[in-house]
Image (cartoon, helix red, strand yellow):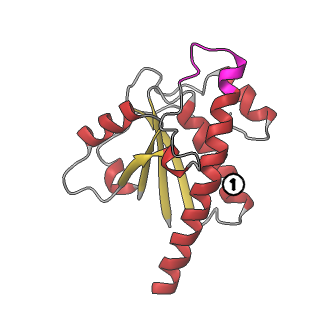
């Protein structure tokens, strides 16, 4: 089992988008039993809330269901429970690195480390934007998730060969 956690600020826009997109891709590949996904925020502003309605609407238009997701905050235990924690931007990455326990097993990276355009670093926050901003987030997340899926599938295949 490979466990991936996506992280943004409040866990209502970017990270639930990434969770929903990646989960959909994992299921389409038949890897649902092998790859687990979740999302969280670096801040506790929206704990227990559904994703932003604009996020849900934009994702649904592309076939991604985020309606069952609920916001939560990152916990130190996450660094022991997940294999990979992916930050949506460099500020989140710095927050995660500061929170990461010394003996944690999770690798912490930016989601856009997986995007083919290596000049991109941050998934911009669409919260104060318009429909186009939510669409842009989806464009970035979908492309990075495709590459993440390839990497995850390769890692899973390597692990099963090594057994």
Highlighted range, magenta = 125-134
Query: Element at badge 1?
Result: helix
Say how many tags the image has: 1
Left or right of 15? Residue 96 is left
Residue with the mark numbered 1: 25
Which residue is pictured at 36% across the width and 55% down the height?
107
Indicate the position of residue 48 as horizontal and vertical percent values: 50, 28
**Residue visible at 51% across and 85% down?**
161
> In this picture, is 132 found above or below 137?
above
- In which quarter of the view is residue 149 placed? bottom right
Mark 1, residues whose alpha carbon is within 10 Å: few (<14), some, or many (≥20)? some
Residue lying at 43% horizontally and 20% vertically, measured from the top left: 45
Question: Looking at the image, which is closer to me, 139 or 70?
Answer: 139
Q: Is residue 34 visible?
A: no
Q: x%, y% of residue 159? A: 48, 78
Report whether 80 appears left or right of 84.
left
Can the viewer see residue 5 in this picture?
yes
Which residue is pictured at 28% across the width and 42% down the height? 97
Magenta span contains residue 104: no
The part of the image, by quadrant, that contains residue 57 is: top right
For the residue pair 23 and 86, the one nearer the viewer reads as 86
The foreground one among 121 and 91 is 121
Classify 73 as above or below 116.
Answer: above
Q: Residue furthest front?
A: 119
141 versus 52 height, above or below: below
Q: Position of residue 37 (x, y in %)?
A: 54, 51
Which is more toward the observer, 148 or 35? 148
The extreme left residue here reads 102
Would you say the magenta stretch is mainly helix, strand or loop?
loop
């Amino acid at each position: 089992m490979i466990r991936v956690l996506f992280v943004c600020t409040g866990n209502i826009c970017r990270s639930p988008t990434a969770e929903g997109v990646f989960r959909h891709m994992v299921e389409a590949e038949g890897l649902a039993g092998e790859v687990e996904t979740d999302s969280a925020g670096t801040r506790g502003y929206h704990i227990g809330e559904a994703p932003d309605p604009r996020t849900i609407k934009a994702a649904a238009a592309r076939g991604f269901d985020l309606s069952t997701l609920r916001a939560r905050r990152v916990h130190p235990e996450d660094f022991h429970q997940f294999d990979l924690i992916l930050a949506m931007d460099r500020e989140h990455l710095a927050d995660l690195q500061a929170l990461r326990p010394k003996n944690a097993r999770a690798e912490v990276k930016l989601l856009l480390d997986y995007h083919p355009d290596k000049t991109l670093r941050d998934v911009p926050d669409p919260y104060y934007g318009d429909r186009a901003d939510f669409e842009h987030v989806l464009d970035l997340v979908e492309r990075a998730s495709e590459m993440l899926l390839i990497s995850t599938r390769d890692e899973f295949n390597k692990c099963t060969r090594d057994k």
